[in-house]
Amino acid sequence: MNFNEQQLIKKCQEGNLQAFSKLVKLYEKKVFNIAYRMLGDYEEAGDVSQEVFLRIYKSIESFKGNSSLATWIYRVTTNMCIDQLRRKKGKQIYSLDEPIETDYGKLYPEAPDASDTPEEQVLKKDVQKLIKKSLEKLPEEQRIVIVLRDIQGFSYNDIAEITGCSLGTVKSRINRGRKALKDIIESDGELFEKVNV
């Protein structure tokens, strides 16, 4: 059953589960990717993504259409990620994605990419780890806009709608966030040099 956006919203507001299932299929990948980039943890991103769609299901009746459906869903996603980050603040977090120390060095729990050489695989993991750790060090307001713009590819206008900030504020936060991210990466001297070999 195919719906345009307005029909999909109307059917969801009427409680049509098939329409809501279609909504989830349309947006689940992007919602998960935003959550993962903001939270930095696969399991946590999955949990938050489920919570996002529960929240959408419960509040779809109140959706007025002042923004696009996608913008509303991504706004709910970023807000729930912010809430999760604030709950985590101050707590010691251990990630399953971190390398395991052994007598023979570090073991990474990720599956290797068969198309890369072992050296390229290690380099890629180092780069990914560096970017992930650096993103986690950014202030919340900068991390959100960097994830939305540079990782998810949203336009400045979309980010302004999603975050509820002015266009000028969004651009300013992106500029400050990019500079801060560059400074964080450069300050990690040994790993930065390894990445740029």
Image: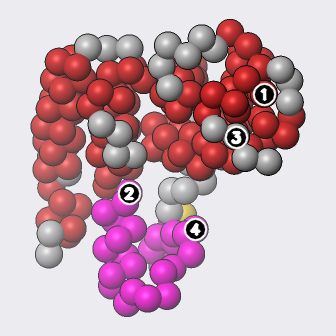
In the image, taking residue 150 as reference, residue 45 lies left or right, namely right
Q: Nearer the viewer, mark 1 or mark 4?
A: 1
Q: Please say if the residues under marks 3 and 1 sit with CB atoms less than 8 Å apart.
A: yes
Q: Earlier in the sequence, mark 1 or mark 2?
A: 1
Query: Is residue 137 in sight in this rendering?
Result: no
Q: From the top left corner, tell me how far across and down residue 107 is, in percent.
A: 52, 72
Residue 125 horizontal/vertical position (percent): 39, 68
Question: Mark number for residue 129?
Answer: 2
Residue 109 shown in magenta: yes
Q: Residues within 10 Å of mark 1 (few under 14, many from 20)?
A: some
Residue interval drawn in magenta: 101-129
x and y percentages locating residue 177 in the rendered image? 21, 33
Tell me if 178 is positioned left or right of 151 in this view: left
Colouring convention used in this rendered image of the protein: secondary structure
Q: Quadrant of the C terminus?
A: bottom left
Q: Which one is in front, 124 or 26?
A: 26
SS at circle 4:
loop
The local secondary structure at tag 1 comes to: helix
